[in-house]
Image (spheres, helix red, strand yellow):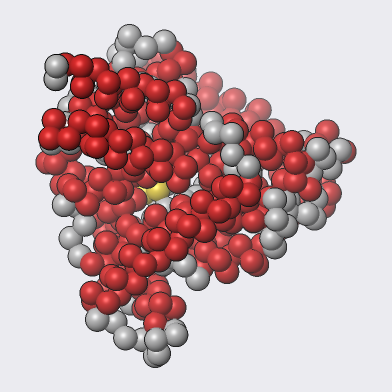
Amino acid sequence: MRAGLKRGFSVPRAVLDGRDVSIASVAEVADPAESTFYAPFKQLPATIPAAEQQLLREEAKAAISGALIPAFGKLLTFFRSEYVAQARTTLGAEQLPDGKAFYQQQIREYTTLDLSPQQIHRIGLDEVARIQAQMDAIIDQVGFKGRSPQTRFADFLQFLRTDPQFYAKTPQELLDRAAWISKRVDGEVGKFIGTLPRGRFTIKPVPADIAPFWTAGRGGATTYWVNTYDLPSRPLYNLPALTLHESSPGHSLQGSLALEQGEQPAFRRENYISAYGEGWALYTEKLGDEMGIYETPYEQFGKLTYEMWRACRLVIDTGVHHDGWTREQALAYLRDRTALSEHEVTTEVDRYISWPAQALSYKLGEITIVKLRAEAEKELGDTFDIKAFHDAVLRQGSVPLPVLESQVRAFVAQSKARQG
């Protein structure tokens, strides 16, 4: 970190306020048994003898108090007194040393495509316009008038952000609703995907020490984390789309399947290519429509606001890192086009600022999968099998988008050959 500061390569100062909370939550724990790092030792496997369990616990407490807490304390002091003070005052990746090459490399890494910032920005603007029309149709459907035609969309967003009917009253209510949606998906997913994983996932709240700056949820092969921090910023109308994306048939299903594909090399089973994984997860939000998961027009709007959110990322990320947008411009762009809460808008924009190009992977990956499905449906006609198509996408493990394209097109050609 000091080497980065010396050459002007750091996280922007504008997004660092409050970021020391996750360091402090470790550094300032008085009792090592209350540390997040001690949690695994509270319930050790019964196969470990009791005496050995006690020894392990004592060793863990000693390591936490003697090494871990002091190390985090040192990091906390460095972060507060040195890093924040010297962090760069610019925002864009292209304003870093050799920034244009760095941002282009980040685009290539996260999207696996050879696209310029200008091309991505244009794709984003086109997607924003397309999705806006669908959002306006939902507002027509529910008969919302607003103060005037000119302010109707902003008024509808304000209604969604403030009406109590759209928000859980307790963390458990939010977790319960996520679990209910997940079980409804369980009843439908086998109709759309042929090969389902043996692995299961659980649902847990995001740990308190990282929740303030985390997204609304995150999914992996074994866990779907739901953020119960600041409930007024966690609308229920977004929860179906979030759950589809993070659990099944999104990240949890795809991650479990990848791990269980024993015929694939480890780098295909265990690696994670953002454009593939996030593209698939965003695609499954659309799949939720076909599965009947969205039950109200507001949940449909939630699905569209999530898609708009990902389309806005193409505009904002390239706007900040290539076109020199300010943080305020980025916040306004996302705030004015989605029903995300103000807390989510802020944490998201700060994420894009501090993590160049990662946010581009979602929409560009989803666009690729949607395009491939349209090609397959056109080529195979009445013989198109949705389960076989999804299996062809998922059996690859984590691959770059050009590889996915070639593999799915090979699947289509093989399917046509079998037809005679």
- Vertical placement of 139 versus 174: above or below? below
Tell which of 42 and 220 is nearer to you.
220
Task: Identify the residue at horizontal 35%, vertical 59% (top origin).
Answer: 304
Task: Identify the residue at horizontal 50%, vertical 71% (top origin).
Answer: 336
- Find residue 275 and report its horizontal and vertical position in percent: 47, 35
- Visible residue check, residue 233: no
- Left/right placement of residue 67 relative to residue 138 reads right
- Find residue 35 and report its horizontal and vertical position in percent: 52, 38
Task: Identify the residue at horizontal 47%, vertical 27% (top origin).
Answer: 402
- Vertical placement of 164 versus 108: above or below? below
Tell which of 253 and 283 is nearer to you.
283
Q: Quadrant of the N terminus?
A: top right
- Visible residue check, residue 129: yes
- Left/right placement of residue 214 relative to residue 389 reads right
- Residue lying farthest bottom? 147
- Find residue 393 and report its horizontal and vertical position in percent: 32, 28
Q: Quadrant of the C terminus?
A: top left
State which quadrant residue 330 falls in.
Answer: bottom right
- Find residue 79 and report its horizontal and vertical position in percent: 74, 45
Tell which of 245 and 102 is nearer to you.
102
- Vertical placement of 181 versus 281: above or below? below
State which quadrant residue 305 falls in.
Answer: bottom left
- Left/right placement of residue 56 relative to residue 407 reads right
Task: Identify the residue at horizontal 27%, vertical 53% (top origin).
Answer: 240
| Image label count | 0
- Residue lying farthest front? 420
Tell which of 136 and 14 is nearer to you.
136
- Left/right placement of residue 306 relative to residue 106 reads left
